[in-house]
Amino acid sequence: MQEKLNDILQRALEELIKIQNKDELGEFKVKFLGKQGELTSILRGMREVAPEDRPKVGALVNEVREKIESAYSAKEEEYNKIELEKELAKSAIDITEPGKFHEKGALHPTTRMFNKLIDICVAMGFKVVEGPEIETDYYNFEGLNIPKNHPSRDMQDTFFITDNILLRSQTSSVQVRSMENMKPPIKIISPGRVYRNDSDGTHSPVFHQLEGLVIDENVSMADLKAMLTSMMKKIFGESTKIRFRPSFFPFTEPSVEVDVSCPTCHGEGCKVCKGTGFLELLGAGVVNPKVLEMSGIDSKKYRGFAFGFGVDRFAMVYDGITDLRNMFKNDIRFLKQMK
Ligand code: PHE
């Protein structure tokens, strides 16, 4: 028995030296140390050994097993080390390699201006209401005191889809929808896209407006002026001045066009404001009582004012952009400058 065990040990050590790779090492383990391995089969054959010899044989088998196991472990460790080194060599970090660079995106100037305006208005207690871009003639025109075939329609070149359905030409349509759906006091803003059949350096067939509407018992032009002044100061700075010029919109009476002192030159006159010191930025006025009545609001009890901001124009003034068309081209070179 001793001889047999020595033979196994001898062969095991010899084979171990010859091993070339991890697979062979695995095979070795099965052959000598596994459940069907040579040593185990000797232990299984213990029955044939005389009972008094069994402890001795058992101890011998264990001794041989330990020797083989420790030789095997040493070899295994050697292979693990080699593999780890190979792995490390493959994934070596080159600290001189330039890092991976992800370009950071930014919001479009119009979106940024929308966010700014909406934040200011929400802080003043306005609720944001949205309306459809495909509108009926009634909400875009008639409900705003612009009857069919009336010359005041010529103020806005419109994309009609049918005689009665159009792409809204102004967010004022949401005024009418809100007055129908809400009970005064009403204090809403409506941001959104509008469409007109124009296109040149200062007009785009699609642009953005933000409409404001306040209806309550004792509101006046003075409130409108105070509110707009405060908003413009928040956007363009404390020193901003505001100037009202008489104008005409069928849905407001009186109507005004509002100029804001040029944020670039502060009223001195420069290229941005074409030397005038002021920029025309919005339309506004006291809601025409006829418009209130059409939407079922008692014009004896309630009054209102409304304003409409041209959001792209605000953004252009704010970011010093000179051509309106740049706002809609999605030219990456332009957008990158606007970060
Ligand atoms: N809707 C008008 C326009 O697009 C602007 C406006 C809004 C004027 C609200 C007065 C009140 O020109």
Image (tube, grey):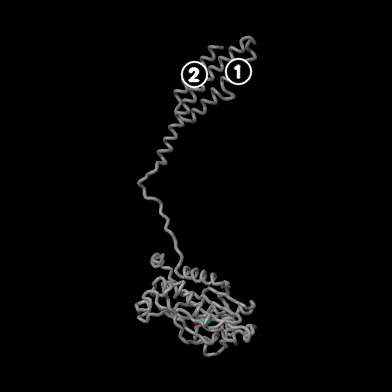
Q: Secondary structure at mark 1?
A: helix
Residue shown at 38% from the left, 66% from the top: 337
Which mark is nearer the camera, 2 or 1? Answer: 1
Seen from the viewer's position, the closer of residues 304 and 293 is: 304
Q: Is residue 125 visible?
A: yes
Between disc 2 and disc 1, whose residue precedes?
A: 2
Tell me which amino acid carries mark 1: Leu
Place residue 2 in its image quadrant: top right
Asked whether mark 1 and ligand 1 are closer than 8 Å, the reply comes as: no
Question: What residue is rendered at 57% in x and 88% in y?
Answer: 148
**Residue 180 occupies quadrant:** bottom right
Q: Name the residue that disc number 1 marks.
A: 43
Q: Nearer the viewer, residue 266 or 291?
A: 266
Above-or-below relation of 98 to 188? above
Where does residue 83 sit, x and y in percent of width and height?
44, 34
Q: Badge 1 local density, few (<14 within 10 Å), some, or many (20+)?
A: some
Horizontal side, residue 212 vs residue 280: left or right:
right
Going by the image, does 198 lie left or right of 30?
Answer: left
What is the quadrant of the C terminus in the image?
Answer: bottom left
Q: Position of residue 4 (x, y in %)?
A: 54, 14
Quadrant (top left/top right/bottom left/bottom right) for the N terminus: top right
Q: Is residue 204 above or below residue 80?
A: below
Circle 2: residue type? Arg
C-alpha separation, residue under disc 2 versus residue under disc 1: 18 Å
Q: Picture coordinates of residue 6 (x, y %)?
A: 51, 14
Categorize mark 2 by other alpha carbons within 10 Å: few (<14), some (14-19), many (20+). few
Q: Is 198 placed above or below 6 here? A: below
Instruction: State the residue at coordinates (65%, 11%).
Output: 51
- Per the rendering, the mark at residue 11 is 2
